[in-house]
Amino acid sequence: MSDTTKAALDDAIAAHFADEQDGALVTGYVLQVQGQGFAVAADDEQTRMLRSIAEQQSIITTLGLVDWLRLQTQGYVLEPDD
């Protein structure tokens, strides 16, 4: 990812978070994106993944966010609201 794109992504995430959370500041984020490739190759080369984290984010923050998301998703899937 280019420095310009990364800066725009960071700015967009900060602006959206502040808007959705009454002006709160972003202290970390993990963005995971899955996409579909179109190369004529084996199936394992068709799925494309991209991950981005906040600038200067510690590994502890990254792992904590990923684990929290995993637990939230697992709870949603295994115990959906009625």
Image (cartoon, rainbow, N blue to C red):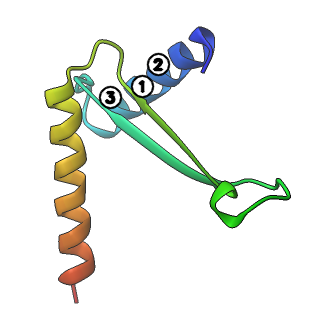
Tell us which disc is closer to us: 2 or 3: 2
Query: Which quarter of the image is occupied by the N terminus?
Result: top right
Looking at the picture, how far across and down is residue 71, in whole percent?
17, 61
Horizontally, residue 65 falls left or right of residue 49, namely: left
| Kind of element beneath mark 1 | helix
Question: Residue 55: x and y, percent?
Answer: 36, 15
Residue identified by numbered label 3: 18
Quadrant placement of the C terminus: bottom left
Answer with left or right where residue 75 lies relative to residue 38: left
Q: Where residue 44 appears, x then y in whole percent? A: 63, 61
The reply to whether discs 1 and 3 touch (Cβ–Cβ < 8 Å) is yes
For residue 15, the mark is: 1
- Read off the residue under disc 2: 11
Mark nearer the viewer, 1 or 2: 2
Secondary structure at badge 3 equals helix
Kind of residue at badge 2? Asp
On the question of residue 80 being in view, the answer is: no
